[in-house]
């Protein structure tokens, strides 16, 4: 069953002297439980596509259906709520809240969702274990390695119980060992939890782990 | 958790936050101490004026205040006396005969105001008897005694038991001379008063002026200054016919000395203005600090908006940070102010050499600080308002942030 349906998607940036067609007529369908890597050269439109999928940017043309809902029709306030409840984000630079501990970073998104403190703590502890950071729950991001921080970011993305996780170049700042560990962990979550992962990446190691690779160039899916 | 994040964010750059907290604390300290000093100074001036010069309420012949001529007296003062004394708020009533005179010794002379009083009645109304530094206060056993201020004694070279000659005009306008023996020398916080006011017994002065059963002033002292308006109203109602017939005029201390009241209002106004100016100046520093803090955390705030934090929560987070920054400084400032004000309220601040100059214009050389509770409350409210307003520019900056641009910066 498709979790994401993209129809004739276009995004043109007009704030430059020459309009830039970052996404130029993409049609794509992503099924629940897929482990998909979106690959392509720099400037090919990977990040723009991910931003559009995440409801962070609005398409110039075309439709994006997530779980059957066309997110193009949502207001900006509804989009914030939609992102909070349906989409998990993992960023290249981890982007954890530096003043919160690992556990609090994970629990924070659940607070935004309105969950009770006890429930937040319980879920966050489970996720800490799931991403292999038991004993590090009270460490602040600055006290964790890059790989560990990215695991916390994955746990935070999972904490909102999203329909899918968007990860933009998640291994770009990690060494090979940390990359391997992170990819194994995400692959494991994909298998055991049936969690849908969509990556944008240049990294060969990510491509090797992916079960589906979508290559885009000049804003179009090439294969 | 947003409250916790805001509080912890405050300490991400400790030095920067501490500088602002210290600035707010010092600003508030300055404003409160300045108010404490001014209020204390005015309190002492008002108390001295009430205790030594004016008392709480005065009754006069309406023309006396305009002209100060001794012919404008209250006749048969006993018709008012009993009614006034019956009021429970009244501590004492002093009937005074007042005239202008030239006081002379062999060496020098000076213009003075002579108050002829009943020593016992006057003792209940004014603090002159308690301000005697040499000799004794007026009593009925002495022969033609006079109590003079220290400043006048220095000016005329008078000592205890020296003779003071006074030249004055009696009720018929005839120049009369009289001699008094200095029985006591008093000293108040008002040098000018000390130099120009002498006290004698009414029973000595009245015959010299040719006045019988007449007084120029009935000074009423109350147990509590707060009751002034109430007693004024009661007396005004009770003596309404005499007031209507222009036989007497009743005035409260601030009606007798409107300048004093204006000065109190002006000082209060300046205190609040000073506080507001300090807070406006501080708000610029707070705005600058918060804007810098937000610009440094642009990516983080963009990420928070991307993962689903609403603009309202972002605004709340920044507002709370600004609030904590201002209020922490404010609390420290107010606590320090309270301690220092309490210390100087008890021990007083000796103005030293400057104080002697102050006493020429009626102010004490040692100032006992006082700060109204309302000033503390106003400070707290204004700090809150300042923090709220100061958070707006930084919040607007954060709210204008586009999560996509933030993510582009991230990646």
Image: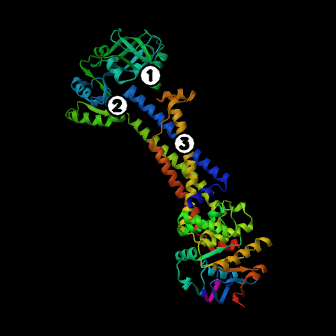
Q: Which of marks 1 and 2 is nearer the N terminus?
A: 2
The answer to whether residue B371 is above or below residue B292 is above
The residue wearing badge 1 is B194
The chief SS type of the magenta part is strand
As rendered, which of A96 and A7 lies closer to the eye? A96
Query: Could you say which disc has been placed on residue B140 in the image?
Result: none
- Residue B315 in magenta stretch: no
The quadrant holding residue A66 is bottom right
- Quadrant of the image containing the C terminus of chain B: bottom right
Residue beneath the point at 79% across and 71% down: A177
Q: Residues within 10 Å of mark 2 (few under 14, many from 20)?
A: many
Residues A188 and A6: in front is: A188
Residue B335 marker? 3
SS for callout 2: loop
* Residue A170 shows in the view: no
The boundaries of the magenta stretch are A5-12
> Residue A53's x, y, as percent?
62, 81
Name the side, left or right, on which B64 lies relative to B315: left
Helix, strand or loop at mark 1: helix
Which residue carries the number 2 mark? B56
Label 3 or label 1, whichever lies nearer to me, is 3
């Amino acid at each position: 069953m498709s979790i994401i349906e993209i129809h004739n998607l276009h995004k043109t940036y007009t704030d430059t002297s020459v309009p830039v067609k970052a996404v130029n007529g993409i049609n794509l369908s992503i099924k629940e439980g897929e482990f998909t890597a979106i690959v392509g050269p720099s400037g090919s439109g990977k990040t723009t596509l991910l931003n559009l999928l995440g409801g962070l940017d609005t398409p110039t043309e075309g439709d994006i259906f997530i779980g059957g809902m066309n997110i193009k029709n949502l207001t900006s306030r509804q989009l914030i709520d939609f992102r909070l409840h349906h989409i998990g984000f993992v960023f290249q630079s981890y982007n954890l809240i530096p003043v919160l501990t690992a556990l609090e970073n994970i629990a924070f998104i659940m607070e935004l969702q309105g969950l009770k403190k006890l429930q937040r703590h319980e879920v966050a502890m489970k996720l800490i274990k799931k991403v292999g950071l038991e004993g590090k729950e009270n460490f602040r991001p600055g006290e964790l390695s890059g790989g560990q921080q990215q695991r916390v970011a994955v746990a935070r993305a999972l904490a909102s119980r999203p329909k899918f996780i968007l990860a933009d170049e998640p291994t770009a700042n990690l060494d090979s060992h940390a990359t391997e560990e992170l990819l194994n962990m995400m692959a494991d979550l994909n298998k055991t939890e049936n969690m849908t992962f969509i990556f944008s990446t240049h990294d060969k190691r990510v491509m090797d782990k992916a079960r589906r690779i979508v290559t885009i160039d000049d804003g179009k899916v090439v294969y | 958790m947003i409250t916790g994040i805001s509080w912890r964010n405050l300490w991400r750059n400790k030095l920067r936050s501490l500088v602002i907290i210290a600035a707010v604390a010092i600003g508030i300290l300055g404003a409160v101490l300045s108010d404490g000093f001014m209020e204390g100074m005015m309190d002492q001036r008002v108390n001295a004026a009430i205790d030594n010069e004016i008392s709480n309420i005065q009754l006069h012949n309406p023309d006396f205040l305009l002209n100060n001529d001794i012919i404008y007296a209250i006749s048969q003062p006993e018709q008012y006396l009993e009614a006034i004394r019956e009021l429970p708020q009244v501590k004492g009533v002093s009937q005074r005969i007042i005239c202008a005179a030239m006081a002379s010794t062999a060496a020098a002379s000076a213009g003075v105001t002579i108050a002829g009083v009943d020593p016992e009645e006057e003792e209940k109304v004014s603090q002159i008897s308690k301000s005697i530094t040499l000799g004794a206060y007026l009593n009925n056993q002495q022969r033609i005694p006079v109590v003079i201020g220290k400043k006048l004694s220095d000016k005329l070279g008078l000592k205890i038991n020296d003779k003071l000659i006074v030249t004055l005009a009696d009720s018929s306008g005839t120049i009369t001379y009289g001699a008094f023996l200095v029985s006591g020398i008093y000293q108040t916080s008002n040098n000018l008063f000390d130099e120009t006011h002498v006290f004698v017994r009414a029973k000595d002065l009245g015959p010299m002026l040719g006045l019988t059963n007449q007084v120029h002033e009935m000074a009423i002292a109350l147990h509590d200054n707060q009751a002034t308006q109430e007693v004024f109203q009661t007396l005004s109602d009770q003596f309404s016919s005499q007031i209507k017939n222009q036989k007497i005029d009743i005035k409260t201390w601030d009606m007798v000395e409107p300048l004093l009241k204006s000065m109190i209002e002006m000082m209060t106004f300046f205190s609040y203005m000073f506080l507001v100016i300090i807070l406006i100046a501080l708000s610029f520093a707070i705005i600058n600090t918060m804007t810098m803090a937000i610009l440094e955390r642009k990516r983080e705030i963009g990420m928070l908006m991307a993962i689903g934090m609403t603009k309202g929560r972002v605004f709340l987070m920044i507002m709370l940070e600004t609030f904590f920054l201002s209020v922490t400084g404010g609390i420290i400032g107010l606590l320090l102010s309270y301690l220092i004000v309490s210390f100087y309220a008890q021990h007083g601040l000796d103005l030293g050499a400057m104080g002697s100059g102050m006493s020429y214009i009626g102010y004490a050389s040692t100032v006992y600080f006082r700060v109204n509770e309302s000033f503390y409350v106003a400070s707290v409210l204004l700090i809150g308002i300042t923090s709220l307003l100061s958070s707006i520019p930084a919040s607007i900056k954060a709210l204008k942030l586009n999560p996509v641009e933030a993510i582009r910066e991230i990646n």
